[in-house]
Image (cartoon, rainbow, N blue to C red):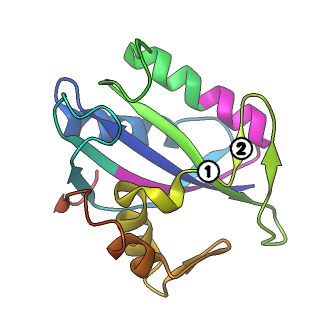
């Protein structure tokens, strides 16, 4: 399976947190991080009374199925000390499965209690779309078309590329 994974942080050294989360993903058994976007600083979405976020998107190949990969991502979050106090609140690390495709390059669609793929908020989040466009400058990725135009149509979310990832 191939995965697009969104990563964000706004507690502590957020840049290090994001880079370390990408490294942690690369250390998973039977998993390889193929590439990662630059780091982006973005304004918070949902709950505004918090620090800006550092975000990135990475692409990974893994023998894990989608539920195993979700479990691995949740395990990495727990290892960082992630506490879910309230929706859209501050977090030391957030790792989201955005999209998945199988070995035949077919995008996976999943809807269950714990997981929806593709992630239902991709098209509403510049902090996902901008790094995704960096990885896919052809403006299309895994069934998501017109990435740059969708991102530009979200004017109230500030975002700025700040550096390359690890």
Crowd class of label 2 (few under 14; some 14 to 19; many from 20; radius 10 Å): some
Of 115 and 33, the residue lying toward us:
115
- Where residue 115 sits: x, y (%)? 71, 37
Question: In which quadrant of the rendered image does the N terminus lie?
Answer: bottom right
Residue depicted at x 71% and y 43% = 116
Crowd class of label 1 (few under 14; some 14 to 19; many from 20; radius 10 Å): few
Of 63 and 54, the residue lying toward us:
54
Vertical order, 143 against 102 (above or below): below
Vertical order, 115 against 161 (above or below): above
| Residue extending farthest bottom | 138
User: Horizontally, is 145 left or right of 67 in the view?
Assistant: left
- Where residue 57 sits: x, y (%)? 43, 55
Q: Does the magenta stretch include residue 117?
A: no
User: Horizontally, is 81 left or right of 136 in the view?
Assistant: left
The secondary element bearing badge 2 is classed as strand
Q: What's the distance in space between the residues labelled 2 and 1, CA to CA? A: 7 Å
- Where residue 121 sits: x, y (%)? 54, 51
Residue depicted at x 19% and y 28% = 50
> Do the residues under discs 2 and 1 have CB atoms within 8 angstroms?
yes
Q: What stretch is highlighted in magenta?
A: 56-72
Q: Mark 2 points at which residue?
A: 116
Residue depicted at x 29% and y 24% = 90
Instruction: Identify the mark at residue 120; answer none if there is no mark.
Output: 1
Vertical order, 152 against 161 (above or below): below
The image shows a total of numbered marks equal to 2
Residue 128 lies in quadrant: bottom left
User: Horizontally, is 127 left or right of 13 in the view?
Assistant: right
Vertical order, 82 against 67 (above or below): above
Of 27 and 90, the residue lying toward us:
90
The secondary element bearing badge 1 is classed as loop
């Amino acid at each position: 399976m191939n995965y697009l994974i969104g990563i964000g942080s706004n507690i502590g050294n957020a840049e290090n947190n994001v880079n370390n989360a990408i490294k942690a993903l690369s250390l998973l058994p039977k998993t390889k991080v193929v590439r990662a976007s630059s780091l982006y600083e973005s304004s918070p979405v949902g709950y505004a009374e918090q620090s800006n976020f550092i975000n990135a998107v990475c692409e990974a190949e893994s023998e894990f199925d989608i539920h195993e990969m979700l479990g691995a991502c949740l395990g990495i979050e727990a290892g960082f000390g992630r506490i879910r106090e309230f929706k859209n609140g501050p977090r030391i690390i957030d790792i989201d499965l955005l999209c998945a495709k199988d070995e035949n390059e077919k995008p996976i669609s999943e809807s269950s209690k714990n997981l929806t793929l593709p992630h239902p908020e991709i098209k509403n989040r510049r902090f996902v779309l901008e790094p995704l466009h960096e990885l896919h400058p052809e403006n299309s990725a895994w069934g998501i078309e017109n990435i740059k135009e969708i991102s530009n149509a979200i004017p109230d979310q500030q975002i700025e590329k700040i550096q390359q990832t690890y």
